[in-house]
Amino acid sequence: MSAKNLQKGNNNIHFSSKKSDWETPQDLFDELDREFGFDVDVCATRENAKCDAYIANDSLDLAWYDPDRDPARVFWMNPPYGRGVGKWVKKAYEESRKGATVVCLLAARTDTKWFH
């Protein structure tokens, strides 16, 4: 196999997948939870929610944070990966502008628009 084909093969392994929802490893979540004290998992299913309170994967159209109701919410976000991840990053940013703390688990795709 040529170096060019090998490189192409590696990109297929590292940058593509047939699924977009990956559960956060528990040990990683536990370490971050000790630091931030998460209240709500905003990209969860009943099967993979990391917090007792969670908002299902379709929470982009919902308000996560209401400073008049909950002045100190801390949100965990491990979004579905794929082309829509930029919408999740934008939503996290918008909620943070209201005063929420949103911690996001994201791939380091520094060449993408959403990353910037």
Image: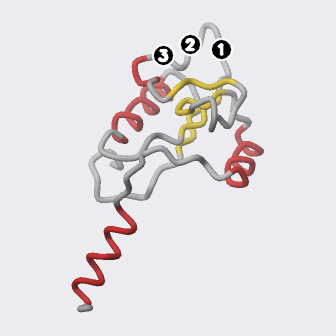
- Name the residue at the right extreme: 34
Neighbour tally class for label 2: few under 14, some 14-19, many 20 plus, Cα within 10 Å: some
Which of label 2 and label 3 is nearer to you?
Answer: 3
Look at 52% across and 33% down and name the residue there: 43
Instruction: Tell me, yes or no, whether the two marked residues, 2 and 1, touch with CB atoms within 8 Å.
Output: yes
Q: Amino acid at mark 2?
A: Asp
Look at 26% across and 76% down and name the residue there: 8
Q: Amino acid at mark 1?
A: Asp
Label 2 belongs to which residue? Answer: 66
Relative to 19, 114 lies left or right: left
Q: Secondary structure at mark 3?
A: loop
Label 3 belongs to which residue? Answer: 63
Q: Point out residue 47 in the picture as x, y percentages from the top left corner.
A: 63, 35
Q: From this view, report whether residue 76 is shown above or below residue 115.
A: above
Relative to 58, 2 lies left or right: left
Which numbered disc flags the more N-terminal residue, 1 or 3? 3
